[in-house]
């Protein structure tokens, strides 16, 4: 399976370098689509690609987008939610499992945002413990 086939499967527009913007090697989301250079599919590449697809999906159907003025908790929850979407999609739909090491940067980001959230003295939502356990260092 190629990244183009995956993009079609999930109904996400895919630019493979046709636009003038640089950065297709690492991939990014812009104008409602994923910008990604086609290459051999690896587990790490698949994980990163699914995170980008998750961003597009969340923009379509969710209120979890981080925008100026959004609550501090959404800043904590957003990277976690993207990871969980990518992980569940990989396991349930593609029958692929990702090692925990793939999410180490994302987990560190969530830990930092949780520290910031707690330092503000804001009330902890019900998902706090679950996300805190997920974000814990290895």
Image (spheres, helix red, strand yellow):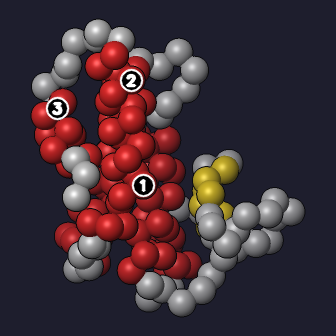
Q: Residue at x 26, y 79 (%)?
A: 96
In the figure, residue 94 lies in which quadrant?
bottom left
Q: Is residue 15 visible?
A: no
Residue 53 in the image, given as x and y percentages of width and height: 47, 59
Q: Which mark is nearer the camera, 3 or 2?
A: 2
Q: Are marks 1 and 3 in contact (CB under 8 Å)?
A: no
Q: Earlier in the sequence, mark 1 or mark 3?
A: 1
Tell me the quarter of the image containing the C terminus: bottom left
How crowded is the residue under tag 1: few (<14 C-alpha within 10 Å), some, or many (20+)? few
Residue 64 in the image, given as x and y percentages of width and height: 40, 33
Residue bearing mark 3: 127
Residue bearing mark 1: 105
Q: Residue at x 68, y 48 (%)?
A: 31
Vertical comparison of 55 with 27: above or below = above
Question: Marks 2 and 1, how far apart in space?
Answer: 17 Å
Residue bearing mark 2: 116
Q: Residue at x 86, y 63 (%)?
A: 20
Residue 45 in the image, given as x and y percentages of width and height: 48, 76
Q: Is residue 7 visible?
A: yes
Q: Earlier in the sequence, mark 2 or mark 1?
A: 1
How crowded is the residue under tag 3: few (<14 C-alpha within 10 Å), some, or many (20+)? few
How crowded is the residue under tag 2: few (<14 C-alpha within 10 Å), some, or many (20+)? some
Q: Residue at x 28, y 11 (%)?
A: 122
For mark 1, give the secondary structure: helix
């Amino acid at each position: 399976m190629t990244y183009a086939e995956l993009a079609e499967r999930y109904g996400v527009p895919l630019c493979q370098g046709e636009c003038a913007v640089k950065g297709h090697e690492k991939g990014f989301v812009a104008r409602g689509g994923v910008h990604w250079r086609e290459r051999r599919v690896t587990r790490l590449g698949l994980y990163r690609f699914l995170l980008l697809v998750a961003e597009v999906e969340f923009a379509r159907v969710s209120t979890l987008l981080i925008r100026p003025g959004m609550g501090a908790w959404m800043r904590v929850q957003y990277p976690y939610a993207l990871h969980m979407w990518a992980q569940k999609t990989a396991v349930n739909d593609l029958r692929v499992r990702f090692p925990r090491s793939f999410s180490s940067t994302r987990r560190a980001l969530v830990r930092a945002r949780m520290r910031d959230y707690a330092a503000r003295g804001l009330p902890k939502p019900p998902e706090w413990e679950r996300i805190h356990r997920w974000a814990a260092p290895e």
